[in-house]
Amino acid sequence: MRKKFSAGSAGSAYIAGIAGIAALGIISGAAGCAREGAAHSGTTESARSAKSAGGGAKSARSAHSGCAPEFTWNTPATGAWTLAVLDDRVAVAPGGTLKIKAKPYRPRTAEVTGVRAGGPRAAEVMKALSEKTGTPLAAPGARTADIARTAEVGFPASGPRAEAVYYQGLRLVETDYRYRCADESRGRGHIRTWETRSETAGLVDCLKPAAENPRTALARLATRERCPAR
């Protein structure tokens, strides 16, 4: 169901649009889009209660499978931002309404490779990485397209016209892992996922100079893809 929000009459078209988007709850916290540039961390209940071994390089043995794996991780490559939703550029007149279509952009799926009979399950591997990083991660099979949300955002009549681009993005996590089961069988694989608490939404205005749009990686990506000659 499409939701409609009015952003009020004050401020620029960009600020008005962001105020409406914030009402959707897809920009988390008071900092809104600003949180994209900060580190995102959060520990699940299971992670808080997990015990570590091997000087922090290995997780505790798990009782969730017959393997009872002990994991060893490469340093997780955390911090690369990617667009998950990107709408086309839309002209919005003063007092107009931006209809957010939330088009999925280059969809990705969270996955764990190297899963085989007798070894840990994919969900078990992902949970262990979440405990290692202290950050909630997308479960195997989750899709970036799942975060898309449609809405309508009203722009102030007193503001300038805009060419608005709506985007949503998130922060990727990727790493190699190895495991050793209680029976000394071993295996290895690769994880591709993202931090679920990193989901961020925003607007850029192609009519505004770069200095007046958000100065974040996601905003730059959206501008490069949708704003001509920028």
Image: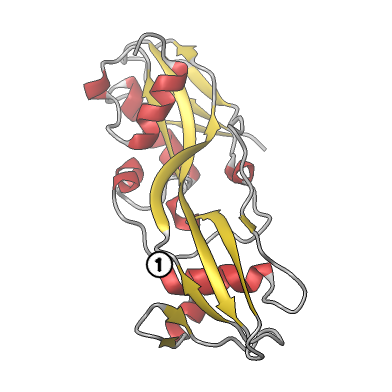
Left or right placement of residue 146 versus residue 218 in this view: right
Looking at the image, residue 136 lies above or below residue 44: above
- Which of 7/120 is in front? 120
The colour style of the image is: secondary structure
Q: In this view, does 114 lie above or below 54?
A: above
Residue at (34% x, 45% y) in the render:
36
Residue 58: give x, y in percent of width and height: 45, 80
Where residue 4 sits in the image (x, y, percent)? 54, 32
Could one spot residue 2 in this view of the protein? yes
Count of marks overlaid on the render: 1
The residue at the point 40 percent across, 45 percent down is 80
In the rendered structure, the answer to whether residue 46 lies left or right of residue 211 reads right
- On the rendered image, what quadrant is the C terminus found in? top left
SS label for mark 1: loop
Residue drawn where x is 63% and y is 41% of the image: 145
Foreground of the two, 27 or 182: 182
* The one of 10 and 129 positioned closer to us in this rendering: 129
The residue that mark 1 highlights is: 42
Task: Find residue 214 and report its horizontal and vertical position in percent.
Answer: 30, 31
For the point 29% across and 15% down, the residue is 208
The residue furthest right is: 117
* Residue 184 falls in image quadrant: bottom right
Q: Residues within 10 Å of mark 1 (few under 14, many from 20)?
A: some
Q: Name the quarter where the N terminus is drawn.
A: top right
Q: Amino acid under label 1?
A: Gly
Residue nearest the viewer, comparing 185 with 64: 185
Vertical comparison of 170 with 113: above or below: above
Residue 132 location (% of width, % of height): 44, 73
Residue 155 seen in this snapshot: no
